[in-house]
Image (tube, rainbow, N blue to C red):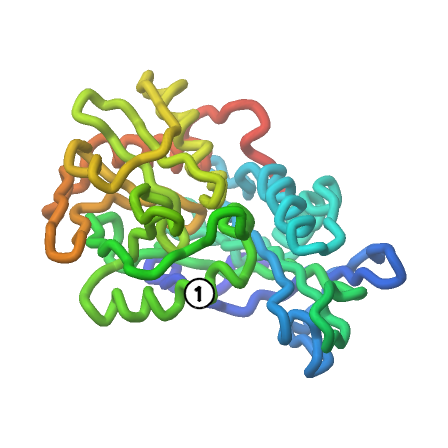
Amino acid sequence: MGKKDIDWENLGFGYIKTDKRFVSYFKDGAWDEGALISDDSIVMSECACVLQYAQTVFEGLKAYTTKNGDIVTFRPDLNAARMEDSARRLEMPPFLAERFVEAVLETVRANADFVPPYGSGASLYIRPFMYGRNAVIGVKPADEYEFRIFTTPVGPYFKGGVKPLTLKVSDFDRAAPHGTGNIKAGLNYAMSLHPIVTAHAEGYDENLYLDAAGRTFVEETGGANFLFVTKDKKIVTPKSDSILPSITKRSLLTVAKDYLGLEVEERPVKLSELEAFDECGLCGTAAVISPVGRIDDHGKMIEFKGSSDQPGEVCMKLRETLTGIQLGEIEAPKGWIRGI
C-alpha cells in the first residue's frame, strides 16, 4: 500500500483518524498482552474515575520519514520513562518502558501509510495515554485502567510556520509548588484552557506562567518549556520542580552543547531578567522550538531578536539542527532514533 491521499503540505495540527490503535487493559493487578484494534471509540461507566477525578496521564511524540525513506521515532524511551513517573504520581500502575516502546513502534508500523513523506514539513503525532476506567465515587484511585496509543498526521503546531510568537504574562497559575506540574497529567492542561482561550481572544499566541509561590520566576507556557539566549550566545533555561521535563528541551540542550559548541545553563530565571536576553524560544514535541518575538508583561513589552518576521538566528539554528537529526539529514547521537 502507498501513502494516504492527504494534502500533506497543508495539514493543520488536528485529529485525523488512522487505521489502528494499541489498547491494553489493567485488571486484577496486571496488564494484559494488549492488541491493535480498529475501533476508535471508548465505552465506560459514567462513574469512571477519569470522569470524576481526572485520573489520566498522557505523552506525545512523533514519527518521521527520513531523507532515505525510513520511518523513525525520536527518543521514545524518554517518553516511556516520563509516563512511568506520571503514572506513579497519580497512583496508576505504570505501563513499563520496554512494553511502551514496543507498543509505540507497533502502532506506527500499523499506520505507516499515514506517516507524512519526507520534505512535507508534517509528521505522525503519537499519543499514548492511560486512565482509570472503573466506577469510583469515593475519592480514591481506580482499580482498572486502560492504556491506549493513537496516531494522527499533523502539520505545524503554530499556524503560519516559523514566525515569532507574542506572549502575555498570565495572572493565572499553571502549577502549585509540590503539585503535579512536573508530570504530564491531563488536569494540568485543563487549568490552562481558560487562560489560553482568553489570551487568543486578546491577540496573543500563548501565556507565560510564573511560579505560583512568589510570582517571580519564569516557569513555562501551557504546553512548552522556555529557552533563552544571552547576548554572548549562552543558552539558559528555567529550572523548577513544577516544570514538566521536556524531552525536546533536553535534546536541544545537547544539540546546543555538542553540535553548536554553545554553553548551556539550567537555573531559576526571574521575570525581571528577560530584558537582558537576546532571544527566546518555546520548545516541546509539537512545536520543536518556536521563536518568541515579544512578551507583554501587563503593558510593558519585552522584545527579543526576531520580534519582526525574522526569527533569531540561534533559535533557528537549534531548530534546523534538531529537525535535521530527526529527519536523518544529520547524524544522531546514539540511541536517539528508533526505526520501526
Occupied quadrant, residue 263: top left
Q: Nearer the viewer, residue 68 or 176?
A: 176
Q: Quadrant of residue 149?
A: bottom right
- Find residue 173 and report its horizontal and vertical position in percent: 38, 57
Q: Dividing the image into 4 quarters, which one contains the C terminus?
A: top right
Q: Name the amino acid type tagged 1.
A: Met
Residue 25 visible somewhere in the drawing: yes
Q: Residues within 10 Å of mark 1 (few under 14, many from 20)?
A: some
* Residue placed under numbered mark 1 in the picture: 191
**Image quadrant containing the N terminus:** bottom right
Residue 38 percent across, percent down from the top left: 69, 70
On the picture, is 237 further left or further right than 307? Answer: right
Question: Eyeballing the image, is 227 above or below 35?
Answer: above
The reply to whether residue 67 is in sight is no
Q: Quadrant of residue 28?
A: bottom right
The structure residue drawn at horizontal position 14% and vertical position 45%, both measured from the top left corner, is 302
